[in-house]
Amino acid sequence: MKILLVSVNASYMHTNLAIRDLKIYAEKYCVEVSDGTGTEHPEIQIAEYTINQPVGEVLRGIAVSNADWILFSTYIWNAEYVCKLLPEIKKILPECLLGAGGPEFGYGAEKYLMNIPSLDFVMFGEGEETFRDMIEKCQGVPENLLENLADIKGIYYRTEENGGKGGKIVFTGNRDLIHNLDDIPFPYPEILKGEADPDHKIYYYESSRGCPFSCSYCLSSVDKRVRFKSLERACEELQIFLDNNIGLVKFVDRTYNLDENHYIGIWKYIMKHHNGKTMFHFEIEAEYLSDKALEFLKQIPEGMMQFEMGVQSANKKTLAAINRSTNVEELAEKIRRIPRTIHQHLDLIAGLPYEDLKSFGQSYDFVMALRPDALQLGFLKILGGTQMEEYAKANGWKWMETPAYETFSTPYLSFSDIAFLKDMEIVTDAYWNKGSFASVLNYVFRQTSPWKFLSALLEYGRKVGAFVQARREAYWFELLNDFVMKENCAGFNSELDKNLIYDLLRYDFVRAGKKGNFPAWYKHNYDKDKHRKLLEENGLLENSRIGFAITEFEEFAYNVLADKPEQEIGHTEVLIRYK
Ligand code: B12
Ligand code: SF4
């Protein structure tokens, strides 16, 4: 018998950890069962696609497998895609059993079973034991499958009426969780076989499951039972990533820093055995980082770790309404103590209770004051199975009925406010997260509110059609220059020095990469002799052709290299060296 576990990922770089865990766990723990022809294990294969592939192409890939069972791993990003595939697969492989697990179908099991007749069952919750149980109880017995399903915890299925199609939907009940996470074998045999794609794929890793916190919008808050892999086991597995020079390993632990021995233990191991290449990503609740942890982090060099930290809002009433007991002052203090060698990614969510545009602006400024390497504006998704779903229904939220269930409006934000915030997401990505405007924005943000300034820039951008299509970086430079020069900084005249902004903008532009030619807004103050002189002083004249090719020379009226150029007016000559 053949079973195909399918994942349709958000993009090529992602891997699906769940289907790997299911396969490897079943292969290790299934007792041998009879499939009618003899006693054997079923053949379990995994197949991964992306939501950007044409449905027909994915369908062909799945159908040629000729599998007896095809089971999908479903999330918010692939649910619609899977809904398109299921009826088509049933036409091509009518005898094949079609099932699905994962948070999206799991928490919406009744809805999906009701709407998709070709879907035979849904597996709810943690999947390893349910999958193993199903293989043992159902392999080779398709004719009375439903009777057997009834004995397996964690399954939603239709009862027999109308051949199972028009029957009632039954849930067989919750199953116990895996007690010891060490029971799950290392999920990436492809890495062990040397068949990984270390530079183009993200490898997800789980050293704990569950989250003790109760954030109302989050599915991980539904199950509070936290379990950890043993430190020894986690370190052994991390060594496999290190030995194979994997570029990016993302810990999917819901909150990584729960148990100090465990989380600092892992960091210590990484620090000691690092290969100079692998970046490790962690989801951190910064407020709970201990002094010992913060002290330890001082040794971490650049390029080894990145932290994603959910701030979500700085409004205390909002935080209380979503059950986040955050002390925002303490949170900010802890984040400031994380060394800047660690890449810091902070999140805000728009659409939460009591957060109107003004309050969101305050949250934005609160986060920007911490100067994160990236600030992600998320938009509240009303996920099935969360407390937020009930709250939103009862309190006048409007959201999209289909995935990604994104909020349209709240009692605090109109649809047009949300549209404004969507444009702010674009502005934040273009101007802050890419890092190309660091000099100019760090100056501006020392003088005025980031939210106020970027909101005015956004309004100007709207006037000139900035957001109607995707833009290249050069466009954003020109837009900011026009906003400052043509619009006179739109009301920021008393706070901002236009000439300094112009110089810093030119500096950011020229340091972003060697230019073939310069756009009209950019005044290139160039002097070849001065360029040559600086090359000579820097030992770059040995091969003058290369020296000129890998550098640029520019003159400024301020010291653009200073920490606070507003305090250092005066002619500066700069040699920029490109990698
Ligand atoms: C990795 C990840 C991503 C990756 C996607 C990777 C990929 N494969 O394409 C990226 C970064 C793209 C992503 C984005 C988003 N994500 Co995300 N993400 C995760 C994360 C951190 C890890 C998932 C994981 O691998 N977990 C480890 C595995 C082992 O656990 P599991 O997924 O729960 O799987 C178990 C069971 O569910 C079940 N199971 C799963 N599949 C199957 C299949 C079968 C057949 C069976 C039997 C069982 C089964 O068994 C597994 C083992 O026990 C989770 C949070 C978390 N820590 O789980 C959120 C999570 C999946 N994401 C979530 C959300 C909301 C988002 C975003 C919408 C967030 C946003 N930006 O607003 C975006 C959407 C992106 C889009 N394009 O629309 C929600 C999902 C809600 C839902 N209904 O699907 C989660 C659960 C976070 C949360 N706490 O609410 N995400
Ligand atoms: S948002 Fe983070 S801290 Fe809150 S319940 Fe979800 S995983 Fe836990």
Image (cartoon, rainbow, N blue to C red):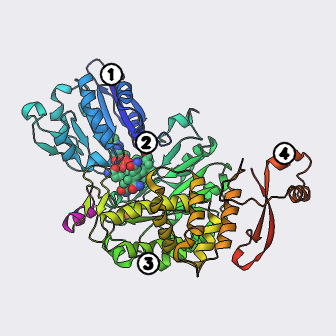
Residue 128, above or below 143: below
Element under disc 4: helix
Report the Cα–Cα distance between label 3 and label 2: 35 Å
Q: Which mark is residue 66?
A: 1
Look at label 3 and name its amino acid. Answer: Asn
Mark 1 Cβ and ligand 1 under 8 Å apart: no
Mark linked to residue 327 = 3
Q: Distance of mark 1 from mark 2, alpha carbons? A: 22 Å
Residue that mark 4 sits on: 546
- Name the mark nearer the viewer: 3 or 4: 4
| Residue sitting farthest toward the left | 161
Task: Name which of mark 3 and mark 2 comes first in the sequence.
Answer: 2
* Image quadrant in which you'd find residue 311: bottom left
Q: Position of residue 85 (x, y in %)?
A: 30, 33
- Quadrant where the N terminus is found in the figure: top left
Residue lying at 49% horizontally and 47% vertically, measured from the top left: 204
Q: Earlier in the sequence, mark 2 or mark 4?
A: 2
The residue pinned by badge 2 equals 16
In the picture, measured across the screen, residue 376 lies left or right of residue 537, that is left
- Ranked by sequence position, the earlier of labels 1 and 2 is 2
Dot 4 alpha-carbon crowd within 10 angstroms: few under 14, some 14 to 19, many 20 or more: few
Label 2 neighbour load within 10 Å: few <14, some 14-19, many 20+? some
* Disc 2: residue Cβ within 8 A of ligand 1's nearest atom: yes
Q: Is tag 1's residue or tag 4's residue first in the polypeptide sequence? A: 1
Depth check, front residue: 372 or 256: 372
Image: 129 above or below 533? above
In magenta, the rendered stretch is 385-395
Disc 3/disc 4 C-alpha distance (Å)? 54 Å
Mark 2–mark 4 Cα distance, whole angstroms, equals: 45 Å
Residue drawn at point x = 29 percent, y = 58 percent: 382
The three-letter code of the residue at mark 4 reads Ile
